[in-house]
């Protein structure tokens, strides 16, 4: 299959060729014909599969088929995304693919002044890429008109639900014309996603190129069990000894990201941090420096897990496992994109054993373990799935059940003030102590 066989216009094929693309990915091969036909679409695809082009290319072609009426451009296509980084990158893709088309696009998101966005909107745009909050800010100020929307795209819909955007999404949908084409892209088809899809998609075509929880085939995953206090030392050792030049490292917290970034700098490893407390300008600069190899390590929180698109990123490190197992898939999906090879390594301490089991349960397989000389530690408890189960007891009461109950230890009081003894035993000791004191005083 080639892009030519999908029915794309000459202008779009020319833009694809200039970027070196000739063969569509599975999600593109299935989604593009559906969108070109005008049908609603419900698509599941893991990150890094090329789904952005899967909706951007046919969206641009359909907009070209119906010219903007009147002298003023109206917003006719709306793409809603969960994060600022993803908004900027989707907008970049729209610009790349529409370079030979007379279409204008804009990305709007928080963290930057609204004035510049308002000026661009007034000049007229065809495609708007937006985060939910900033879009509703513009709607509230009357600077955006959604009454001419012909196509709606919800990208990373599951992430938007995780981030609590469901009410904003429903409000935005209520402001759109009833007659329009709807596309929903999600990494998973959870019950919540299906409920959302049923609320606004009209007889959608279903496209699913990966089962829930799968990760890219080209990502080599492994785990190193290490003591928590030695994680930073191990990370610096791995980067230095293996001569890694571009590494994306995930932490759980913003403070942890800043602290790790400072520690790596002290180890002589150039690093930058990206998280929600950083201004949009600082986040953009950090990402740009990382892409241009000016810094070796980008330390990020999960806000960046789905919004970063870094060409040929070789290494992703989970310095701390995510609190939600599904976020592991999105984190490591930053590498191994578009069929390229990548490595995802997780540094796991004993306190993270349950989080690791949850991830392996989601993946339905065990992640291979690595050992590094000088950093050995005791192994993690085996997953309940792999432990040998005790033989089931026969039904009915055995003759020595009574003796087992008789010999069963009493439940002990966990109140630290009681020293771990039962409350009854404590009272007995106090009574005996009082009687001894009375005899001694008598």
Image (cartoon, rainbow, N blue to C red):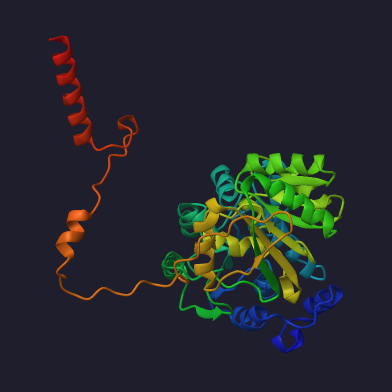
> Observer-nearest residue: 102 or 136?
136
- Above-or-below relation of 242 to 266: below
Depth check: 383 or 61 in front?
383
The image shows residue 356 at horizontal and vertical percentages of 54, 61
Residue 246 visible: yes
Q: Is residue 124 left or right of residue 184?
A: right
| Nearer to me, 193 or 384 | 384
Residue 78 visible: no
Image quadrant assignment for residue 200: bottom left
Q: How many numbered dots are placed on residues in this image?
A: 0
Answer with left or right where residue 369 lies relative to residue 389: right
Quarter in which the N terminus is drawn: bottom right
Instruction: Pick whichever, 274 or 105, lies toward us.
Output: 274
- Please report the residue visible at 65 percent of the width from the left and 72 percent of the height from the top: 51
The image shows residue 24, relative to residue 103, as above or below, that is: below
Q: Residue at x 45, y 70 (%)?
A: 387
Q: Horizontal and vertical percent for residue 75?
A: 64, 60
- Displayed quadrant of residue 259: top right
> Which residue shows up at 59% across the image and 79% down it?
209
**122 with respect to 266 (left or right):** left
How far across and how far down the image is residue 402, in percent? 14, 61
Q: Position of residue 231 (x, y in %)?
A: 68, 49
Looking at the rendered image, the quarter that the C terminus falls into is top left
Residue at the far top in the pictured view: 441
The image quadrant that residue 427 belongs to is top left
């Amino acid at each position: 299959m080639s892009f030519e066989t999908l029915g794309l216009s000459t202008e779009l094929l020319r833009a694809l060729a200039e970027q070196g693309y000739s063969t569509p990915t599975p999600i593109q091969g299935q989604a593009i014909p559906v969108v070109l036909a005008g049908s609603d679409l419900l698509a599941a695809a893991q990150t890094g599969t090329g789904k952005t082009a899967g909706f951007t290319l046919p969206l641009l072609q359909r907009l070209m088929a119906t010219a903007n009426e009147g002298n003023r451009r109206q917003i006719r296509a709306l793409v809603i995304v969960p994060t600022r980084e993803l908004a900027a990158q989707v907008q970049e893709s729209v610009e790349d693919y529409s370079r030979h088309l007379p279409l204008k696009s804009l990305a709007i998101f928080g963290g930057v002044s609204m004035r510049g966005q308002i000026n661009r909107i007034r000049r007229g745009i065809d495609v708007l890429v937006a985060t939910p909050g900033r879009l509703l800010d513009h709607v509230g100020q009357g600077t955006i008109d959604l009454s001419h929307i012909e196509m709606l795209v919800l990208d990373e819909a599951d992430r938007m639900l995780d981030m609590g955007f469901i009410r904003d999404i429903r409000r935005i949908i209520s402001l759109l014309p009833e007659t329009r084409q709807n596309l929903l892209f999600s990494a998973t088809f959870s019950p919540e996603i299906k409920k959302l899809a049923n609320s606004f998609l009209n007889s959608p075509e279903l496209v699913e190129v990966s089962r829930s929880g799968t990760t890219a085939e080209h990502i080599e995953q492994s785990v190193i069990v290490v003591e928590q206090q030695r994680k930073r030392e191990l990370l610096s050792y791995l980067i230095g000894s293996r001569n890694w030049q571009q590494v994306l490292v995930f932490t759980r917290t913003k403070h942890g990201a800043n602290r790790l970034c400072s520690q790596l700098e002290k180890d002589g490893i150039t690093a930058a941090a990206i998280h929600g407390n950083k201004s949009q300008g600082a986040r953009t600069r950090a990402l740009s420096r990382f892409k241009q190899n000016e810094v070796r390590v980008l330390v990020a929180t999960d806000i960046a897990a789905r919004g970063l698109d870094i060409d040929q990123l070789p290494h992703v490190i989970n310095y701390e496992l995510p609190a939600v197992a599904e976020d592991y898939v999105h984190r490591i999906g930053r590498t191994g994109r578009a069929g390229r090879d990548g490595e995802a390594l997780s540094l796991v301490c004993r306190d993270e054993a349950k989080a690791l089991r949850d991830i392996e349960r989601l993946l339905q397989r065990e992640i291979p373990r690595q050992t590094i000389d000088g950093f050995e530690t005791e192994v993690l408890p085996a997953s309940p799935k792999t432990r040998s189960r005790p033989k089931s007891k026969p039904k009915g009461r055995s003759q020595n059940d009574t003796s087992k109950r008789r010999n069963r230890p009493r439940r002990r009081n966990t109140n630290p003030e009681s020293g771990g003894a039962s409350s009854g035993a404590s009272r007995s000791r106090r009574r005996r102590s009082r009687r001894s004191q009375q005899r001694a005083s008598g």
